[in-house]
Image (spheres, coloured by chain):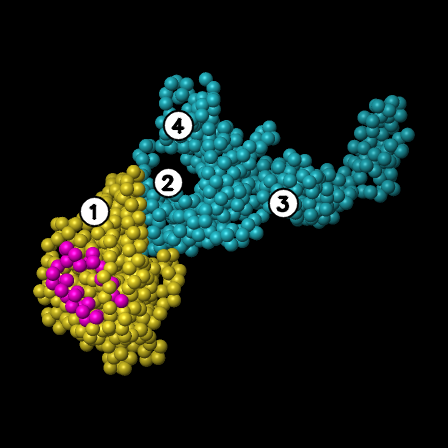
Chain colours: A yellow, B cyan
């Protein structure tokens, strides 16, 4: 049952082959049995899940079921869930019970989905290996001494280990796509503004975007149908009609123009990963696509610019965690300054503090023009590169990450090498474009992802391109033997 | 040495919107602490601001009211600093691109001349909450009801040269915001607060001196007193050969002195940057036209009309047009009473304002409504009562309410205009005063003018003030010959 796709489970529920309560219980049992090995959940909401499953079954019996009704899902612990701990994997919010639901959570619940729990992540989504979590690192289900990627590592590992049919993630610089790549699942980062950020605890507001993490592109399309859309509570969400993302999944790819940016295949790319990506691209040629060599000349600036913009916004976004109204408060503060210093000093982890300091520095008087403003200009250049490229191609393809999963602790002491894990994904966030990572092969027993980047609000095409590949190949259906 | 005072004002005005600038919470003053603070106002994790369109409309109104440029694309920025009553750790404000650009306000000086004061800019921002230091035994209470209340911060050019000019400017802004109906301007409730930047330079010097900023002054009287106290202090310093250090100061009304805040409280680098949660604010020509069409008559226009159409003196027109509520009150009195505008102006500016001042009350909460006063003056106009009786009735209206007509009826205050009745009283008075009559008859014309007052007084007294004074005079003049 657990190895089936969300689509197959949805069909089985509709056909009455299985009830939501049976399905939910099955996944709850699997979490109990297997999660200790991967540590992908921070909170499991068993009681609530079973109640939701019961309600979903009743809804189906009443004839009001939607396609997702009764299907279990797990939410990254960055999404506020009413009455349930929402920690952002930080000691700072270890005691925080959210008083409201994120729009994404609300929409999934309205569709009748069952929340299994909240998944582990890098603290405040800051990390590429899921090692910065206050609740301990998540392990890659394929090889548990390896990292699952991050920051949505818990969601990726949970889907890869088939502890949930699907999960939500968020992507600020690659946090959906990179762990999807490392765990061998499908992860879609929608266009900035496509999915509401209301209730999604902000890391870098101009870059953050929620999206689905699933086994297949078809599953992602089903989730996007319920997840996407304008939200009056989020001024940066876009009021553009939401298409039926499943409608165009099977369209043929004849004449599809695929752009291959030279800068994505240069030094720094692992040879195995490069080979996997080339094979995937060859598969697309067989499906009728044509290849176009393109240039994204400012790619090398995306990481430095990102590490100004994202920490700058984060330094401000995380100011509200001050020990005054919610979250961690230090013991016996001597005065206000002591309250601030110790609550934040003790409540935040090292990586979070590092980024707050970088961001505070970048916004300081006298440095603003040289750092923040300059980075914003670079961002414009990166966007222009993509705009230029999309004049000639329909999608852009390349690796999601330069390497397959690395070992736990391998890069923990070297933040810059960790930051380079996101070299191919960050520019997509800087431009606000949609991108998807799909499993395309293996390297030394670890999955490798192919990244497909689309034009603004062209998620339908991304899902179509990914789905066609998944119809021809079986990488997405593989699952780690220990979790079979 | 001869010093020139240079003053610029930053006026914070709370905009009278139904809900907060970035959330749906109510903005009513004086509610129980933290009952008007929802998720967004508390700065909960994951919440996002959504701009209140009415706050934008009100800001544009103000911009049009001071003849300013409205920025077609203004930007909200975050002003970052830590304080317990600032829930997000930053205030959403406007920094580089404010919604209202350069404009001006005309003030009237004591000699009656007018002076134009430049307005540099006005920007939208959110108010902070309140820290309550009393009642918590060494701890601080936080009330976030005020957090997120829309503010318009109006920054003037350093164009004022005395505390009196500063007060005149503050009053002009106060008058304007009430005319535009964008704020109640209630200074005691903090709806309007002034920061005063004061510096001194030698007469003839073109460079500005170093300024100190007096924070949060909350009445016109204190604006004047605080600035004068600051001028005195700076002058002492400069005359003693010391230099002024830029500083933020507070005014202590008890000691009538300004004192510097601890330097720590002002050593902030606010790290302004555009708020990524809000899109740039686009103001279209269409929006501007809509607001323009909705703009009320402004103080200058109203003064002009009062003088030309209602034939009031400039002085009366200025007094009555200074405040929109007062002006509306006056115009209601004119239309209800049908009396001469001059009579109405006297009653409103002397009797009504005098009574309000004496009782420390505002025109908004006047115990006598414009309809009541209009009803009273109507009876002066149609000779039902005399002005003297009217004052008596006004007092009755003030204390016990009701209508002038009811009071006239129930107390029998209707003026006596029946010639026969007045003659009868006059005859009685003459019959009762043989000595005075003899004295009167013996006197020359000049003395008679004085002596007749006695008979008028007696007649009025005997009629309980109801006899028509003109008729009394005429009849006496006839009978005493």
Report the front residue among B416 and B141: B141
Image quadrant in which the C terminus of chain A is located = bottom left
User: How far, Cα to Cα, is label 1 from label 2?
Assistant: 38 Å
Find residue B152 and report its image quarter: top left
> Which range is magenta?
A257-285
Reading the image, the residue beneath label 1 is A354
For the residues beneath circles 2 and 3, the answer to whether they share a chain is yes
Question: Residue A152: x and y, percent?
Answer: 21, 60
Find residue B426 and report its image quarter: top right
Residue at 25% x, 79% y is A12
Report the front residue among B37 and A245: A245
Query: Mark 3 or 4 closer to N-term?
Result: 4
- Tell me whether circle 1 and circle 2 mark residues in contact (CB < 8 Å): no
Other-residue count near label 2 (Cα within 10 Å), few / some / many at <14 / 14–19 / ≥20: few
- Tell me whether circle 3 and circle 4 mark residues in contact (CB < 8 Å): no
Which chain letter goes with mark 1? Answer: A
Residue A461 seen: yes
Residue at 45% x, 49% y is B72
Residue A343 seen: no
Reading the image, the residue beneath label 3 is B329
Q: Is residue B429 above or below residue A246?
A: above
Instruction: Report helix, strand or loop for mark 2.
Output: loop
Q: Is residue A272 shown in magenta? A: yes
Most common secondary structure along the magenta stretch: helix
User: How far, Cα to Cα, is label 3 from label 4?
Assistant: 45 Å
Query: Mark 2 or 4 closer to N-term?
Result: 2
Find residue B441 and report its image quarter: top right
Reading the image, the residue beneath label 2 is B134
Which chain letter goes with mark 4? Answer: B
């Amino acid at each position: 049952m657990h190895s089936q796709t969300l689509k197959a489970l949805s069909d089985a529920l509709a056909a009455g082959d299985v009830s939501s309560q049976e399905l939910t219980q099955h996944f709850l049992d699997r979490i109990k049995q297997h999660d200790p090995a991967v540590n992908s959940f921070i909170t499991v909401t068993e009681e609530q899940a079973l109640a939701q499953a019961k309600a979903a079954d009743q809804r189906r019996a009443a004839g009001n079921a939607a396609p997702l009704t009764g299907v279990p899902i797990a939410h990254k612990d960055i999404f506020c869930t009413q009455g349930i701990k929402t920690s952002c994997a930080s000691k700072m919010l270890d005691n925080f019970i959210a008083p409201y639901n994120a729009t994404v959570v609300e929409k999934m619940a309205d569709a009748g989905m069952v929340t299994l729990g909240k998944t582990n992540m890098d603290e405040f989504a800051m990390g590429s290996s899921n090692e910065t979590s206050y609740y301990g690192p998540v392990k890659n289900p394929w090889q548990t001494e390896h990292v699952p990627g991050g920051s949505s590592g818990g969601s990726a590992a949970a889907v890869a280990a088939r502890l949930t049919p699907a999960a939500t993630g968020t992507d600020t610089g690659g946090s959906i796509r990179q762990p999807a790549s490392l765990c061998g699942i499908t992860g879609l980062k929608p266009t900035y503004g496509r999915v509401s950020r209301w209730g999604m605890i902000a890391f870098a507001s101009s870059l953050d975007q929620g999206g689905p993490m699933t086994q297949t592109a078809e599953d992602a399309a089903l989730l996007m149908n319920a997840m996407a859309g304008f939200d009056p509570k989020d001024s940066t969400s876009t009021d553009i009609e939401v298409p039926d993302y499943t409608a165009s999944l099977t369209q043929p790819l004849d004449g599809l123009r695929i752009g291959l940016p030279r800068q994505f295949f240069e030094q720094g790319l692992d040879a195995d990963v490069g080979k996997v990506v080339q094979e995937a691209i060859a598969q697309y040629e067989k499906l009728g696509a044509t290849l176009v060599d393109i240039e994204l000349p400012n790619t090398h600036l995306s990481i430095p610019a990102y590490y100004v913009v994202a920490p700058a916004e984060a330094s401000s976004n995380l100011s509200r965690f001050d020990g005054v109204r919610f979250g961690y408060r230090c013991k016996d503060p001597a005065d206000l300054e002591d309250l601030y210093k110790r609550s934040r000093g003790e409540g935040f982890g090292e990586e979070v503090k590092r980024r707050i300091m970088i961001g505070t520095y970048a916004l300081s008087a006298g440095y603003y023009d040289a750092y923040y403003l300059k980075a914003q200009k670079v961002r414009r250049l990166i966007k222009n590169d993509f705009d230029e490229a999309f004049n000639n191609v329909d999608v852009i393809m390349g690796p999601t990450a330069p390497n397959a999963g690395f070992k736990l602790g391998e890069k923990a002491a070297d933040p810059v090498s960790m930051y380079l894990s996101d070299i191919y994904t960050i520019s997509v966030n800087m431009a606000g474009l949609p991108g998807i990572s799909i499993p395309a092969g293996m390297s030394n027993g670890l999955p490798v992802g192919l990244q497909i980047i689309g034009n603004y609000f062209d998620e339908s095409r991304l899902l179509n391109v990914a789905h066609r590949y998944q119809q021809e190949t079986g990488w997405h259906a593989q699952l780690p033997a220990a979790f079979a | 040495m001869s010093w020139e005072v240079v003053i610029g004002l930053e006026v914070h005005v709370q905009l009278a919107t139904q809900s907060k600038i970035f959330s749906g919470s109510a903005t009513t003053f004086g509610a129980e602490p933290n009952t008007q603070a929802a998720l967004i106002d508390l700065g909960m994790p994951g919440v996002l601001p959504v701009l209140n369109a009415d706050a934008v409309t009100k800001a544009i109104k103000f911009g049009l009211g001071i003849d300013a440029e409205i920025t077609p694309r203004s930007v909200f920025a975050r002003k970052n600093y830590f304080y317990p009553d600032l829930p997000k750790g930053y205030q959403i404000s406007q920094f580089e691109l404010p919604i209202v650009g350069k404009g001006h306000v005309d003030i009237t000086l004591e000699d009656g001349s007018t002076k134009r004061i430049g307005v540099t800019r006005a920007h939208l921002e959110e108010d902070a909450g309140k820290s309550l230091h009393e009642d918590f035994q060494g701890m601080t209470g936080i009330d976030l009801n005020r957090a997120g209340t829309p503010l318009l911060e109006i920054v003037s050019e350093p164009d004022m040269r005395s505390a009196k000019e500063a007060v005149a400017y503050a009053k002009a802004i106060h008058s304007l915001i009430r005319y535009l109906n964008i704020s109640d301007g209630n200074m005691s409730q903090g709806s309007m607060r002034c920061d005063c930047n004061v510096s001194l330079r030698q007469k003839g010097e073109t460079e500005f001196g170093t300024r100190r900023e007096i924070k949060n002054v909350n009445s016109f009287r204190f604006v004047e007193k605080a600035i004068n106290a600051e001028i005195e202090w700076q002058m002492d310093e400069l005359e003693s050969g010391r230099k002024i250090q830029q500083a933020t100061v507070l005014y202590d009304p008890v000691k009538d002195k300004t004192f510097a805040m601890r330097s720590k409280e002002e050593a902030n680098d606010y790290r302004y940057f555009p708020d990524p949660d809000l899109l740039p604010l686009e103001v279209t020509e269409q929006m501007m036209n809509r607001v323009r069409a909705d703009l009320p008559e402004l103080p200058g226009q109203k003064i002009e009309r009062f003088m030309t159409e209602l034939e009031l003196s400039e002085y009366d027109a200025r007094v009555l047009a200074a405040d929109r509520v007062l002006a509306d009150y006056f115009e209601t009195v004119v239309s209800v009473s049908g009396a001469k505008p001059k009579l109405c102006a006297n009653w409103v500016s002397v009797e009504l304002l005098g009574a309000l001042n004496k009782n420390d009350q505002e025109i908004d909460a006047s115990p006598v409504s414009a309809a009541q006063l209009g009803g009273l003056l109507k009876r002066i106009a149609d000779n039902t009562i005399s002005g003297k009786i009217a004052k008596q009735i006004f007092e009755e209206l003030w204390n016990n309410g009701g209508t002038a007509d009811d009071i006239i009826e129930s107390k029998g205050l209707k003026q006596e205009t029946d010639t026969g009745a007045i003659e009868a009283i006059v005859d009685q008075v003459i019959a009762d005063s043989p000595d005075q009559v003899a004295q009167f008859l013996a006197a020359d014309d000049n003395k008679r003018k004085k002596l007749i007052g006695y008979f008028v007084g007696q007649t009025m007294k005997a009629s309980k003030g109801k006899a028509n004074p003109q008729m009394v005079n005429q009849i006496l003049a006839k009978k005493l010959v």
